[in-house]
Image: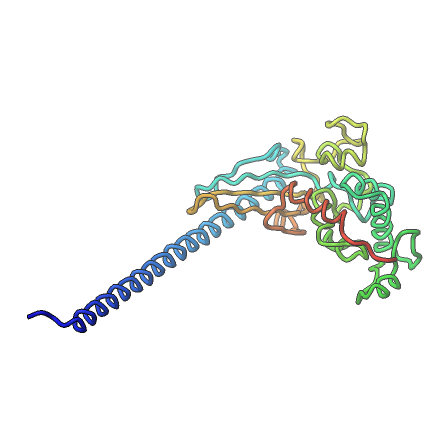
Amino acid sequence: MRRSKAGAHEEGFALLLVLIGLAVIALVVAAVVDGARRYANEAETDVALVQLRAAVDGADATAERDIAESGIVMAPVLNHAEIFMIGGIPVTVSARPESSKIDINAADVPRLRSLLLISGFSADRAARLADQIADWRDADSEKRPLGAETADYLMAGRAYGTANRPFASVSELSLLLDGTPDLVTCLAPDVTVYTRRADVDLTHASDRVRAVVAPSASPDAGTGAPLQSVVAGRAVAAGGIYEFDAKAKGGMAAGTIYSLRSIVRVTGDSQRPVWLLSRQSPIPSREDSDRACTRAAQAPLSSS
């Protein structure tokens, strides 16, 4: 018996609904599978990151112990970058004395201005920022020619004024009247607040610091008596401050990277060989710093 056209049409429509339903189910299944795959990848990356962090923490602690003990046993370990195997993960650790940086609490205004100039700032902006740094850290309320005191901050709408004390951290540079977070990222690799020394260990200084402190000095030039630096292959004196960079890559997820920068003071106390002064993760690259310098050099200035 020949089916009616209406019946054939209904069957075709039903088949179409079935096909659409199957397509929807297939899309749902595909979405679930893709979501599960992404979740698994994210979970794998998270586990890898935990692995790397644990390895970096272990290597960092080992390096700090070694540099603290070297002053006692006279056998420095970290002459150059070292690779520590922690849980089967290679961690590269390097160290340098904090005295190889310019202390923003001890440097005079001309040196601060020179650092800003060589970092890409205009002469006017460098002079303003150098004076603002000096006004921030000094105890008086007398404004330098291009600086800023509390009244200037309040007039600019800030809810604070100058600290009238030494900088507690490099990050405080962002609080200056013309300061920005980019200014901190720009200068952080080359400045410190921990040594409270005007002199700089040029043996381990960056090219930028060397160009500021002693433009005519050779790359291997030092300043006066050699510092007690394990980085240079000598014993470490109690009280020395060092920056450690630890980096690891890999773990369970290829390409995962974890890095940590620690600044510690060697105490000379066997029970507590180092004091942790600061930690930062991840470690910004020199390229990150250079890009931040460019942005900071172009940021709008206050009207003061």
Residue at x 74% of width, y 41% of height: 101
Of 13 and 95, the residue lying toward us: 13
Quadrant containing the N terminus is bottom left
45 over 224 or under it: above or below: below
Q: Position of residue 295 (x, y in %)?
A: 72, 48
Classify 140 as above or below 3: above
Residue 87 in the image, given as x and y percentages of width and height: 44, 44
- Locate the C terminus and report the quarter of the image it occupies: bottom right
Q: Nearer the viewer, residue 1 or 283?
A: 1
- Residue 109 position, x and y percent, is 87, 45
Q: Is residue 110 above or below residue 49?
A: above
Is 6 placed left or right of 55 in the picture? Answer: left
Does residue 41 appear to the left or right of 283 in the view shown? left
Residue at screen point 28% across, 65% down = 20
- Name the side, left or right, on which 81 lies relative to 123: left
Asked if 228 appears above or below 148 in the picture, the reply is above
Q: Residue furthest left?
A: 1
Toward which corner of the image does residue 81 lie, by quadrant? Answer: top right
Image quadrant where residue 228 sits: top right
For the residue pair 154 and 228, the one nearer the viewer reads as: 154
Question: Residue at (73%, 51%) from the top-left corner?
Answer: 170
The residue located at (63%, 46%) in the rendering is: 284
